[in-house]
Image: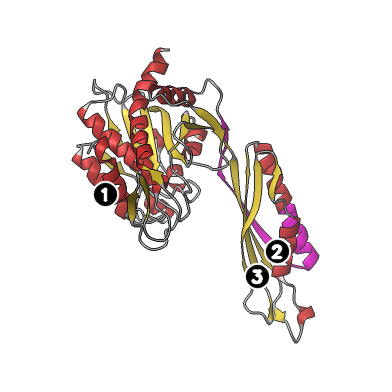
């Protein structure tokens, strides 16, 4: 496989359903490609740890002198958000899309394709610095696969993912801290027609909590949202239970914790006003970051794009990626735009030219690392 066949592997990958925790089928195709290139790989136990059917796939490619130390890690995730039916990748007028209903899967199979095609290039022409390849699972579930990968196996001094639906040339220089919040309200059931005053409605408590919680964009580079509510057993029953689920994202960690505190207080106050109890679970899903101008990943990313004649553009992203896990572990990492559009929707697409440019970007990273190190 070489760069000219990127479309072929992309079409095959996108045609395989790979919901989070169900990546085994697509992993088999990826590993088959690695085997064909005589690249050794291993699978960790992340799948069993998180309740999935597949673990992370980790592979190494030595440099021209057979070294592994000081590697560059390229990472992509194998899972997608749920599709509707079976994806049918199609190339029409130079653009890849789904010929059926649901997502295409360019997030993140465009990156998987680019890394495999780059690996093919390096199998013929060994890289100037060692390469590590990591294909994670369950990224769409708050980065679970990356969280369960043992970074002690890696000798990478810098890591890159291609996981942002923006033009190639985009560099994510900052990302927020993210919290998930689940509140379970417990009231008292009663017949809504015969004895409504004997009940304490958990749904009413949840509604009060939602109405008094921060929402939308309560601060700069911060968002808060209640995205799911579930409760009650029937229209003639005062609801005994109601669950709400929400999230907070903020570039400033102190603002994130303050918004979480406000949501928590809103839930406690609402439960008290209605005469219910509430059990609140808070989880920090991932930690944010802000890259300085001296950040190694940012410097290398800029150098790689300049080698391709592409002007780099740094942005703040409200989303998370496996980079957040690596950065928190002390590995300088960078998320780059992958050229895809409208990801997580039935309009998801990517130009074939951008897919091939993504391959070129992956191939340019080792040379960029060497140029930055020399500089």
Residue 208 locus on image (x, y percent)? 75, 62
Whole-angstrom CA distance, mark 2 to mark 1, is 46 Å
Q: Is residue 136 visible?
A: no
Near-viewer residue (257 or 321): 321
Relative vertical location of residue 243 with respect to residue 332 in this rendering, above or below: below
Q: Residue furthest front?
A: 93
Magenta segment includes 283: yes
- Identify the residue at horizontal 68%, vertical 48% (top origin): 260
| Rendered image: mark on residue 29 | 1
- Numbered range of the magenta stretch: 264-290
Residue depth check, mark 3 versus mark 1: number of the one nearer the observer: 1
Relative vertical location of residue 277 with respect to residue 237 in this rendering, above or below: above
- The kind of secondary structure element at disc 3 is strand
- Identify the residue at horizontal 69%, vertical 40% (top origin): 255
| Rendered image: mark on residue 241 | 3
| Rendered image: mark on residue 206 | 2
Near-viewer residue (43 or 73): 73
Q: Earlier in the sequence, mark 2 or mark 3?
A: 2
Relative vertical location of residue 160 with respect to residue 139 in this rendering, above or below: above
Residue 64 locus on image (x, y percent)? 24, 22
Q: Is mark 3 in CB contact (under 8 Å) with mark 1?
A: no
Q: Earlier in the sequence, mark 3 or mark 1?
A: 1
Relative vertical location of residue 195 with respect to residue 200 in this rendering, above or below: below
Q: Is mark 2 in CB contact (under 8 Å) with mark 1?
A: no
- Identify the residue at horizontal 29%, vertical 44% (top origin): 7
């Amino acid at each position: 496989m070489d760069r000219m066949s990127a479309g072929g592997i992309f079409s095959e990958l996108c045609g395989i359903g790979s919901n989070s925790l169900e990546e085994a089928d697509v992993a088999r195709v990826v590993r088959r490609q690695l085997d064909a290139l005589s690249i050794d790989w291993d699978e960790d136990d992340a799948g069993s740890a998180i309740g999935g059917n597949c673990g992370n796939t980790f592979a190494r490619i030595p440099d021209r002198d057979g070294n592994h130390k000081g590697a560059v890690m390229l990472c992509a995730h194998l899972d997608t958000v749920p599709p509707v039916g079976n994806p049918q990748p199609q190339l029409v007028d130079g653009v890849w899309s789904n010929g059926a209903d649901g997502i295409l899967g360019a997030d993140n199979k465009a990156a998987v394709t680019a890394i495999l095609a780059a690996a093919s290039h390096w199998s013929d022409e060994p890289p100037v610095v060692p390469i590590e390849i990591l294909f994670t699972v369950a990224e769409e579930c708050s980065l679970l696969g990356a969280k369960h990968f043992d970074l002690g196996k890696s000798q990478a001094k810098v890591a890159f993912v291609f996981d942002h639906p923006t033009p190639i040339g985009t560099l994510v220089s900052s990302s927020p801290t993210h919290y998930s919040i689940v509140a379970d309200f417990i009231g008292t059931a009663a017949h809504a027609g015969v004895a409504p005053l004997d009940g304490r409605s958990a749904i009413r408590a949840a509604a009060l909590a939602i109405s008094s919680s921060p929402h939308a964009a309560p601060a700069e580079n911060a968002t808060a949202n209640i995205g799911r509510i579930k409760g009650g057993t029937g229209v003639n029953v005062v609801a005994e239970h109601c669950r709400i689920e929400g999230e907070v994202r903020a570039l400033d960690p102190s603002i994130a914790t303050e918004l979480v505190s406000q949501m928590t207080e809103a839930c406690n106050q609402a439960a008290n006003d209605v005469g219910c109890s509430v059990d609140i679970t808070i989880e920090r899903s991932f930690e944010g970051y802000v890259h300085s101008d001296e950040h190694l990943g940012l410097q290398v990313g800029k150098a790689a794009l300049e080698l391709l004649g592409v002007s780099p553009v740094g942005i703040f992203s409200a989303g998370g990626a496996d980079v957040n896990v690596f950065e928190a572990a002390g590995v300088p990492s960078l998320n780059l735009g992958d050229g895809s559009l409208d990801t997580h929707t039935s309009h998801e697409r990517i130009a074939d030219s951008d897919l091939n440019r993504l391959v070129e970007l992956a191939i340019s990273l080792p040379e960029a690392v060497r140029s930055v190190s020399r500089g």
